[in-house]
Image (tube, rainbow, N blue to C red):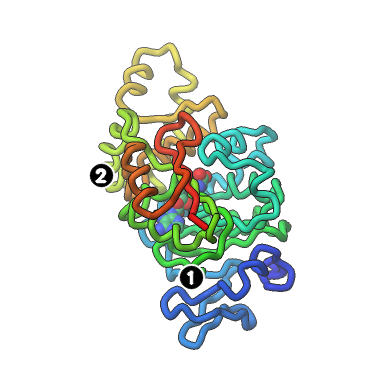
Amino acid sequence: MSLSNFDMDTNAALKRVGDNLIDPSSREQLRLVGDEFVSGSSRFQVVRGVPRFVASDMYVRSFSLEWNTHNQTQLDSFRGDNSSEDQFVKKTGFNQEALSGKLVLDAGVGAGRYCDVVSRWGADVVGVDLSYAVEASAVTFRDRKNVWIAQADIGKLPFADETFDYIFSIGVLHHTPNTKAYFMKLVPLLKKGGVISIWVYPATPDYVARKAWVPFVNKIPPEMFYKWCRWFVPFLDRNRNDRLAGWLARVFPHSDQGLGLENDILDTFDGVSPKYHGVHSPDEVRNWFTEAGLINVIEPSTWQSCMQGTKPQ
Ligand SMILES: C[S@@+](CC[C@H](N)C(=O)[O-])C[C@H]1O[C@@H](n2cnc3c(N)ncnc32)[C@H](O)[C@@H]1O
């Protein structure tokens, strides 16, 4: 793949990050030299068009498989509907008027369903993910000069404090080893007056039930569990009135979101395959925002455990 979308001169998002792109360990500035981002003490390679600030996908192997298999399933640009845009507005409370022209961080970009929305709205978007999902999203967005994708860990991001106007992280932080601690890593990256929105799994019975399955599913290789999802979800769909299928549907967690079979296969896999699966009440999330010193803390919709807050000027 050409690297032309990934250098300072042609990529608007990277250009705006500019001097705020730093070595996450030494915090020295990074410069692009050939196909490496270089500081005085480290080098980070650009591989297949994606800068790598981590050595591997660590604990998110299931997501590497998920997003490279379903690289477009949930993208409005591919589906031809507004399902991701609708969810984005509900989960963040952000709108086009506010984000257009702003520098935005999508923390845990996955295949890029929300990066797709925000970049179409006219924001300059940096999308980071720990998994090899970045391989898929970098290809999807290779012609959008306002999107820059990097493989990086939210726990150790290569950005100086006060870089971004807006930050969002949807369905991500509960998949890290410590939801609150990883949220706290994002707050310093906001400019003064900047706004952050997150959505984490709520502690409702359906998510608590899914969490109980995680230790069992984690013992199965992701490829094998994915094959089960590819069989099981269409089986339930074909046999809606069958008693055996009805029983299986009650016993095994599965997705039926009305967004098509491919979406439900992806979401069934997504629901129980990740290593970490935190659940958090809205009160708990609100307390993190307050503790982080954010103001104007609101729940943008009735979607549980979404929260938005602003960094004071
Ligand atoms: C359920 S997916 C959500 C992706 C996207 N936000 C969406 O809603 O479609 C969770 C994503 O978080 C990423 N992730 C988990 N831990 C991470 C970390 N420490 N740093 C960056 N990304 C992480 C996973 O690799 C995965 O792609």
**Is residue 289 visible to the viewer in this orientation of the structure?**
yes
* Residue 177 position in % (x across, y down): 31, 55
Residue depicted at x 72% and y 60%: 145
Give the secondary structure at mark 1.
loop
**Residue 208 placement, left or right of 169:** left
Residue carrying label 1: 53
Residue lying at 48% horizontally and 70% vertically, measured from the top left = 53
Label 2: element kind:
helix
Q: Residue furthest front?
A: 313
Farthest residue, direction bottom: 40
Name the residue at 49% across, 54% down.
Answer: 311
Q: Nearer the viewer, residue 136 or 33?
A: 33
Q: Is residue 104 above or below residue 213?
A: below
| Viewer-nearest residue: 128 or 161 | 161
The residue at the point 49 percent across, 20 percent down is 238
Tell me if the residue at label 2 has its CB under 8 Å from ligand 1: no
Q: Is residue 209 left or right of residue 29?
A: left
Left or right: where does residue 265 sit relative to residue 201?
right
**Closer to the camera in the image, 303 or 64:** 303
Badge 1 density bin: few <14, some 14–19, many ≥20, Cα 10 Å: many
Find residue 179 and report its horizontal and vertical position in percent.
Answer: 34, 51
Q: How many marks?
A: 2
**Tag of residue 183:** none
Residue 77 occupies which quadrant of the picture?
top right
Amino acid type, callout 2: Pro
Residue linked to disc 2: 215
What amino acid does circle 1 point to?
Phe
For residue 297, above or below residue 181: above
Q: Quadrant of residue 249?
A: top left
Q: Position of residue 99 (x, y in %)?
A: 64, 49
Quadrant hosting residue 292: bottom left
Q: Marks 2 and 1, Cα distance to the nearest angstrom?
A: 29 Å
